[in-house]
Image (cartoon, rainbow, N blue to C red):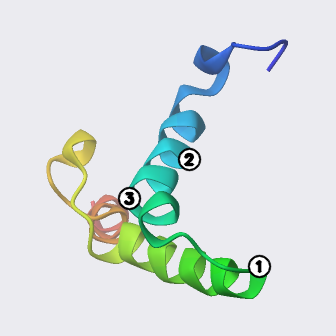
Amino acid sequence: MDGRGRALDNIFVERLWRNVKHEDVYLKGYANMAELMIGLAQYFSFYNRQRLHTSIDFLTPVDYEALRMAA
């Protein structure tokens, strides 16, 4: 990123962190850093193994990668 407000420099990571905040952090309001670290580990496990992603034809990232590697 080369300056403030340059979200388009890395749009995929910006979208990921938006999802993390709106689907987990804001909803759970963690009380301390230890809770946050545990919660984020659980969220990323969910994000990669259970959450369906429209950009990869409603597959999880784990399933998509398995299909890609098998091809």
Circle 2 crowding by C-alpha within 10 Å: few under 14, some 14–19, many from 20:
few
Disc 3 residue type (three-letter): Glu
SS label for mark 3: helix
* Total number of numbered discs in the rendering: 3
Residue 3: x and y in percent read: 83, 12
- In depth, the one of 55 and 24 nearer the eye is 24
SS label for mark 2: helix
Residue 1: x and y in percent read: 79, 21
Circle 3 crowding by C-alpha within 10 Å: few under 14, some 14–19, many from 20:
few
Q: Earlier in the sequence, mark 2 or mark 3?
A: 2
- At 15% from the left and 47% from the top, the residue drawn is 57
In space, the residues marked 1 and 2 are separated at their CA atoms by 17 Å
Q: Is residue 53 left or right of residue 13?
A: left
- At 27% from the left and 59% from the top, the residue drawn is 71
Disc 2 residue type (three-letter): Trp
**What number is the disc on residue 23?**
3
- In this view, 57 is above or below 49: above
- At 69% from the left and 13% from the top, the residue drawn is 6
Of badges 1 and 2, nearer the viewer stands 1
Q: Which residue position is annotated with label 1?
A: 33
Q: Which residue position is annotated with label 2?
A: 17
In space, the residues marked 1 and 3 are separated at their CA atoms by 18 Å
Disc 1 residue type (three-letter): Met
Q: Are marks 1 and 3 in contact (CB under 8 Å)?
A: no
Q: Quadrant of residue 37?
A: bottom right
Q: Is residue 8 left or right of residue 51?
A: right
Q: Quadrant of residue 35?
A: bottom right
Q: Earlier in the sequence, mark 1 or mark 2?
A: 2
In space, the residues marked 2 and 3 are separated at their CA atoms by 10 Å
Q: Earlier in the sequence, mark 1 or mark 3?
A: 3
Q: Looking at this rendering, what residue extends furthest in the left direction?
A: 58
- At 32% from the left and 70% from the top, the residue drawn is 66
